[in-house]
Image (spheres, helix red, strand yellow):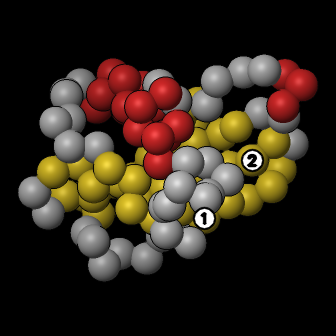
Amino acid sequence: MFCDAGSVITCFEFEKGANVKPQLEEKEGKKFDVFTAVEFKTQVVAGTNYFIKVHVGNDEFMHLRVFRSLPHENKPLSLHSYQSSKTKHDELAFF
């Protein structure tokens, strides 16, 4: 599924309000001028895992695993893990 306004997790929520970018920047030790979700998959667990392909500038992409807890827990999205050195054509898979 490609990221669009009708998605369960909207592009706006991910890119602007989810606080995922600062979490990744802290783990990577660098800032990203570009941070655009281009594709995602979901996995329902005790909450939801989002596997998101993110364009981070030039020809660089990263795959993120972001966790959303159940609604009654009222917690923000959290970056669980990520894979760097990805390309636009790398398949987005569960990890």
Position above or below: 36 against 6: above
| Residue 9: x %, y % from top left | 61, 48
Q: Is residue 80 left or right of residue 45?
A: left
Looking at the image, the residue that sits furthest to the front is: 5
Name the residue that disc number 1 marks.
41
Q: Position of residue 67 (x, y in %)?
A: 66, 39
Position of residue 10 relative to residue 21, above or below, is: below
- Residue at the spot x=61%, y=31% of the render? 77
* Quadrant position of residue 89: bottom left
Q: Residue 56, how many percent across, how many down?
A: 23, 48
- For the residues labelled 2 and 1, the Cα–Cα distance comes to 10 Å
Structural crowding at the residue carrying mark 1, measured as other residues with C-alpha within 10 Å and reported as few (<14), some (14–19) or many (≥20): some
Amino acid at pointer 1: Lys
Residue under numbered circle 2: 48
- Quadrant the C terminus occupies: bottom right
Label 2 amino acid?
Thr
The image quadrant that residue 21 belongs to is top left
Q: Residue at x 40, y 53 (%)?
A: 37
Q: Is residue 79 left or right of residue 27?
A: right
Secondary structure under the numbered disc 1 in the rendered image: strand
Q: Which of 58 and 93 lies nearest the eye of the viewer?
A: 58
Do tag 2 and tag 1 residues touch (Cβ < 8 Å)?
no
- Which quadrant does the N terminus fall into? bottom right
Residue drawn 52% across the image and 37% down it: 13
Q: Any mark on residue 13, and which?
A: none
